[in-house]
């Protein structure tokens, strides 16, 4: 449910604040509003007096005060803003809080009153809360919460975000300072409240449709916690609030984020950090103080979400609760800010949530059936029958309808032949037989598959990890057989049936972390939760089978590059040179890679070999080798092999052109006639040697001389500013100069006339503060 400005606060009561005789009058300027106190006492139209106690905070266009109701002494917060501000923040606050109140959320402050003093300021009276979570964390030793408190607080904060999304708003500034605990006087100090809705944006239209994303969106948020999308100045969605929440959770658990010393202007550097901490050793370091398995699962899931995605909050709650259980944390373990009392705050009961969803779905279906029956009677059809098969399903209504539609598309009956024909575009032949056999077991001896068995099957394979684990057990096959079936079927769904060589490789990779036989449901459920690849393949296969989805999740491969074009979806303009696209020209390749930073060279020979090398410092045209031991070679021969540097010498990456005595071309590892591989400036020819001491022993081309079929250069990471080098390969540091520096005669005339050179100091390089 979304709340619009026209629904709330559009015409606040103009006469709500009256000042008693003798009180100081308010000045009309912002600075006078923000300093000192509001006039005392305040009298509301209902006859209730409010007295300003103290200023709690102020911003550019308003302030927040603690006020006391004189009739009973109860204290509240009063948020004020000037009436002539261009952006009216209180309207958004009011809309959000009213929406949360209708939803029944306990994580938002209750509105007590609202109004304005004519030509002065608007105000909003609401419940007063306690300290914010930023202050509570930084006062802790090592500036971090215990794992118990971090997990309990993060679960509540995620529920705040979920409720905000349910009423149709994005927060766009998720950070610890925008969450606060309740007041101990009200026994709410175990409950967390969401604050500050000034940057909120409604993501749905009046018809509850998702608003179309803008191509460019101004940055909104706090750099430290902002999502990658926000830092790229793209339209934010529900996914971005959840991503910011994740960074907050890591900070609470670990005590700091890797980019904590970077500030608002350092958005590009923070963006680079956030892109790098998502895999490999960087991810291990990022989550070293956190429950790694659960947190990496959450991060991987967040990265799968898109603009239109509705986050699976239950999946994230499950990961949080699993982390608590794995670390022996009791549900009532005390919080850091109240160590003497057992925890009694809100908790997420996933089983109860599922039950409520089922009851809601069943009610909706029942209501729809009533409507259908009424319509049938009105049309004179007294033989109307419900099409629910009297089965109370756990599927969402839309999913249930899609499953029924798929079943009905087969015809009047579904025997083995019909099922084979129906599923041939998404199931591998052997896996078809496994699925059909299990579906038949659900039909209780009936000859044909029933719609009820189809729905029950969908409830398992499209359910949560526990349900999917049950399905794997019920299939009655070794886990490897099921994994191979899913992988093979996935390639059919993606219309890549010819990639049979990928099946055993991907199956081996998935099975590396699989539990050992005999399989227990709990062990399988944990494995599914922590597997990064298999659940994605599983979902694609069974959604294609049961829902008729045709959307592909693998990027297209256009055949013009050796590397998959998936890289182009990750980094814009990553491919700097491709001979099939840019032509067979060494000069064009040199211009593409010279001085542009770290890159990968990939070569495909006419004999079918594919190999290349990674240059961590890139290539700079000159007589010197560049790079260090992080450079490596690789070759693709069924499996990708990596050949690391030995450290025996520093002949890593080389590039030169139009020299008389030095080799002209691009090479790795060696010199003269002995290279791991070398591309001549006469494009199309190359050399390769087997015994090169720079890298581990390999013979990339398999022959001394080879002919190039295709060569590519891929930039890795952000583009670097082009640098200039002298004839020895040393970088030329250019200092910015003024027009007077270029014209010494004019400078001398000015100096003789007594004019001081004020700009000298400003052109010196700035001092960099390490802190």
Image (spheres, rainbow, N blue to C red):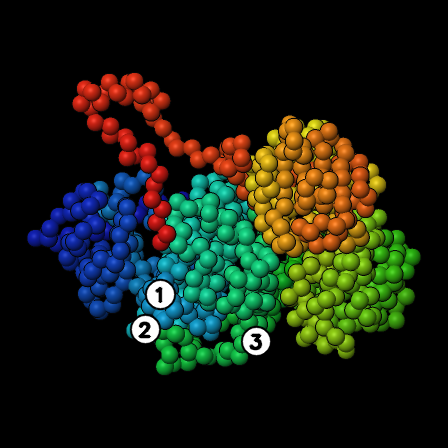
Question: In what element is the residue under mark 2?
Answer: helix
How busy is the neighbourhood of tag 3: few (under 14 within 10 Å), some, or many (20 plus)? Answer: few
Q: Is residue 237 visible?
A: yes
Q: Earlier in the sequence, mark 2 or mark 3?
A: 2
* Quadrant hosting residue 357: bottom right
How busy is the neighbourhood of tag 1: few (under 14 within 10 Å), some, or many (20 plus)? Answer: some
The residue where tag 3 is placed is 326
Q: Are marks 2 and 3 in contact (CB under 8 Å)?
A: no
Left or right: 95 in relation to 52 = right
Rendering coords of residue 265 (x, y %): 39, 45
* Quadrant hosting residue 543: bottom right
The residue where tag 1 is placed is 138
| The one of 98 and 354 positioned closer to us in this rendering | 354
Q: Are marks 3 and 1 in contact (CB under 8 Å)?
A: no
| The one of 121 and 283 positioned closer to us in this rendering | 283
| Residue at 33%, 44% in the rendered image | 767
In 3D space, how far apart are the residues under numbered discs 2 and 3 (Cα atoms)?
31 Å
Q: Is residue 106 visible?
A: no
The residue where tag 2 is placed is 184
Rendering coords of residue 442 (x, y %): 81, 69
* Quadrant hosting residue 225: bottom left
Question: In what element is the residue under mark 3?
Answer: helix
How busy is the neighbourhood of tag 2: few (under 14 within 10 Å), some, or many (20 plus)? Answer: few
Rendering coords of residue 587 (x, y %): 66, 28
Left or right: 190 in relation to 522 = left
| Residue at 80%, 36% in the rendered image | 707
């Amino acid at each position: 449910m979304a709340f619009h400005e026209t629904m709330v606060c559009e015409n606040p009561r103009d006469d709500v604040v009256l000042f008693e005789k003798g009180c100081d009058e308010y000045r009309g300027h912002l600075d006078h509003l923000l300093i000192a106190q509001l006039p005392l006492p305040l009298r509301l139209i209902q006859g209730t007096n409010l007295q300003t106690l103290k200023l709690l905070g102020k911003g550019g266009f308003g302030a927040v005060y603690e006020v006391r109701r004189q009739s009973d002494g109860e204290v509240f917060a009063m948020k004020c803003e000037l009436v002539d501000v261009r952006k009216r923040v209180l309207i958004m606050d009011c809309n959000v809080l009213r929406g949360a109140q209708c939803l029944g959320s306990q994580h938002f402050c209750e509105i007590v009153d609202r109004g304005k003093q004519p030509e002065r300021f608007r105000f909003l009276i609401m419940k007063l809360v306690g300290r914010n979570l930023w202050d509570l964390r930084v006062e802790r030793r090592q500036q971090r919460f215990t794992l118990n408190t971090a997990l309990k607080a993060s679960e509540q904060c995620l529920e705040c975000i979920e409720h905000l999304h349910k009423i149709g708003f994005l927060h766009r500034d998720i950070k610890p300072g925008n969450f606060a605990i309740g007041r101990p006087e009200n026994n709410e100090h175990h409950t967390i409240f969401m604050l500050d809705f000034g940057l909120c944006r409604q993501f749905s239209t009046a018809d509850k449709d998702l608003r179309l994303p803008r191509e460019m969106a101004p940055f909104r948020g706090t750099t430290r916690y902002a999502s990658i999308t926000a830092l790229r100045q793209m339209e934010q969605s529900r996914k971005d609030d959840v991503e910011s929440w994740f960074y907050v959770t890591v900070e609470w658990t670990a005590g700091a984020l890797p980019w904590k010393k970077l500030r608002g202007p350092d958005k590009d550097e923070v963006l680079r950090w956030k892109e790098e901490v998502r895999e490999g050793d960087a991810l291990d370091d990022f989550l070293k103080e956190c429950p790694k398995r659960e947190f990496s699962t959450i991060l991987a899931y967040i990265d799968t979400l898109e603009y239109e995605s509705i986050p699976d909050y239950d999946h994230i709650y499950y990961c949080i609760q699993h982390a608590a259980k794995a670390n022996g944390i009791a549900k009532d373990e005390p919080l850091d800010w109240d160590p003497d009392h057992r925890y009694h705050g809100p908790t997420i009961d996933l089983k109860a949530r599922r039950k409520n969803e089922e009851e809601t779905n069943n009610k909706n279906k029942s209501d729809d059936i009533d409507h259908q029956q009424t319509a049938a009677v009105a049309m004179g059809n007294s033989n109307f029958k419900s099409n629910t098969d009297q089965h109370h399903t756990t599927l969402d209504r839309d999913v249930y309808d899609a499953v029924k539609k798929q079943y009905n598309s087969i015809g009047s009956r579904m025997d083995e032949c019909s099922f084979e024909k129906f599923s041939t575009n998404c199931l591998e032949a052997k896996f078809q037989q496994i699925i059909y056999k299990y579906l038949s077991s659900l039909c209780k001896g009936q000859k044909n598959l029933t719609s009820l068995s189809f729905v029950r099957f969908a409830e398992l394979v499209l359910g949560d990890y526990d349900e999917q684990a049950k399905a794997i057990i019920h299939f009655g096959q070794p886990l490897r057989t099921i994994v191979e079936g899913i992988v093979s079927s996935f390639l059919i769904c993606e219309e890549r049936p010819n990639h049979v060589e990928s099946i055993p490789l991907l199956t081996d990779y998935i099975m590396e972390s699989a539990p050992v036989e005999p399989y227990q449901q709990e062990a399988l459920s944990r494995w599914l939760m922590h597997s990064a690849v298999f659940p994605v393949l599983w979902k694609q296969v069974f959604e294609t089978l049961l829902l008729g989805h045709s959307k592909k999740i693998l990027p297209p491969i256009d055949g013009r590059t050796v590397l998959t074009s998936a890289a182009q979806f990750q980094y814009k303009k990553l491919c700097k040179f491709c001979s099939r696209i840019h032509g067979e020209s060494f000069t064009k390749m040199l211009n593409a890679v010279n001085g542009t930073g770290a890159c990968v060279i990939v070569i495909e020979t006419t004999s079918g070999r594919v190999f290349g090398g990674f240059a961590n410092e890139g290539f700079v045209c000159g007589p010197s080798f560049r790079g260090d031991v992080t450079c490596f070679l690789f070759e693709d021969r069924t499996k990708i092999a990596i050949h690391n540097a030995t450290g025996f010498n520093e002949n890593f990456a080389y590039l030169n052109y139009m020299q008389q005595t030095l080799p002209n071309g691009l090479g790795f590892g060696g010199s003269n006639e002995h290279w791991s591989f070398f591309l001549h400036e006469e494009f199309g020819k190359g050399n390769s040697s087997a015994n090169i001491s720079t890298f581990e022993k390999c013979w990339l081309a398999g022959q001394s001389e080879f002919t190039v079929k295709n060569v590519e250069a891929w930039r890795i990471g952000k583009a670097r500013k082009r640098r200039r080098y002298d004839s020895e390969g040393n970088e030329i540091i250019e200092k910015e100069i003024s027009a007077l520096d270029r014209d010494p005669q004019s400078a001398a005339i000015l100096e003789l006339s007594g004019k001081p050179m004020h700009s000298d100091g400003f052109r010196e390089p700035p001092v960099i503060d390490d802190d």
